Amino acid sequence: MPEMARFRAKHGSLEERPDDAVASILHVDMDAFFVSVELLERPELRGKAVVVGGRPDQRGVVTAASYEARKFGVHSAMPLRTAGKLCPHAVFLDGHHEKYGLWSDRVATILAKFSPIVEMVSIDEAYLDLAGTERLHGPPLAAADKLLRMITRTTELPCSAGLATTRLVAKVASDQAKPRGLVWVAPGQEAGFLAPLPVRKIPGIGEVTERALRALGIETVEQLAAVAPEKLEKIFGQWGDALYRKARGGDSYEFVIDAEPKSISHNHTFGEDTNDDESLHSLLSHLSQKACKRLREAGLAARTLTLTIRYAGFDTHTRAKTLSEPTRLDADIFRVFQSLFAEHRDRKRKIRLLGVALSGLTHGAAQLDLLDPERRERMEKLTRAADKLRDRFGFGKVQFGGSLRADGSSSEHEE
Ligand SMILES: [Mg+2]
């Protein structure tokens, strides 16, 4: 998508911003979208607690909740039963995803009238660049106001928006604007706008980072922005750079890691199903090392290791092991995958795919020192040296014993 590339290149960082910058990035976000669409046909439920996803005695999860239901602690992804307990007087409705898709398209059609550069990032959320559209719609703030009115008039669906110099600030602004609001953050006001907010309000900062920051006594964006970049990098690795930038309202596309990773995984599908011990073991080692390297680059350690084995015919088995302490060491992690594989593999069947996943991710290496500190130190050193070589020569060149020779005969993908 060339338009998206342009969009990203243009607003890569705050430092490159010229002095006469205008806030032209608009983040539009529909308010409680699924609920709002359902209410188009049930207007009598407006202003009431409404939960979409199914009945409270069903097994599924909440897909959306009205603001009235949210006041009782109901939120999406929560089991319907829990929602029923928290808010028994709510009206529970089934979801209709095709309908949401149709309304999303209608909104997208309106957005396209306001800028040639629109990036829908989910079914109810989009970024627009309003730069250069003045002749048609006036300055960005006027255009944003006109756009929100047009959406509300045409669809009767409530929405909010944030207008700022970067995508990150625009997204935080639209969240602050909800419901039915527009927040404009003028150029130069980014840091002041973000300062009082809890760090969790920053897109990409999740529960894990929030917890790690709280342990350091950091709760607000202002406190985060006051930490030296060297310190953040020491604690969080590459993710520390992104945090430093985010605390100042900057986007961070130049980093692979724009959001805190929830899990790291690598899969490999064989060109031809195989039962060959040597190929299988070397592949397992290769996947394990690749995942470990990404883990370390993100400054993380993992506690739960999951192995996926897919046999011919798409029969897929996953087995997980949770360690007592998180680790980031190749040798530890590979040993677990090896034993999971040995234990659960059906030797009589040919294997189509192997996959490894690391989850239960935590920041900081403090926990790593609890067990056999000397050995850990030695291993960490060795691993760091190997990572350096890998960066210099490409991943295929430096591997610990027994891993796969890349033969290019099959495909591999990350999830
Ligand atoms: Mg929304």
Image: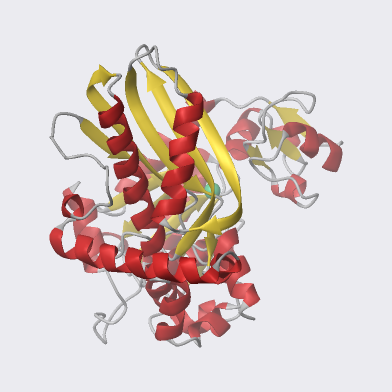
Specify whether 382 is left or right of 205.
Answer: left
Specify whether 162 is left or right of 273.
Answer: right
Q: Quadrant of the C terminus?
A: top left
Q: Is residue 106 visible?
A: no
Q: Along the line of sight, which residue is nearer the eye, 218 or 344? A: 344
**Colouring mode (rainbow / by chain / secondary structure / one colour):** secondary structure
Q: Residue at x 43, y 66 (%)?
A: 299
Q: Along the line of sight, which residue is nearer the eye, 202 or 99? A: 202
Q: Residue at x 45, y 71 (%)?
A: 377
Above or below, comparing residue 281 to residue 309 in the picture: below
Place of residue 362 in the rendered image (x, y in percent of width and height, measured from the top left): 55, 60
Asked which quadrant contains residue 35, the reply is top right
Above or below, comparing residue 348 to residue 36 in the picture: above
Place of residue 285 in the rendered image (x, y in percent of width and height, measured from the top left): 33, 42
Q: Is residue 104 visible?
A: yes
Numbered-mark total: 0
Place of residue 359 in the rendered image (x, y in percent of width and height, measured from the top left): 51, 48
Above or below, comparing residue 143 to residue 284 in the picture: below
Q: Along the line of sight, which residue is nearer the eye, 208 or 283? A: 283
Q: Residue at x 41, y 77 (%)?
A: 233
Place of residue 390 in the rendered image (x, y in percent of width and height, measured from the top left): 21, 60
Asked which quadrant contains residue 145, the reply is bottom left
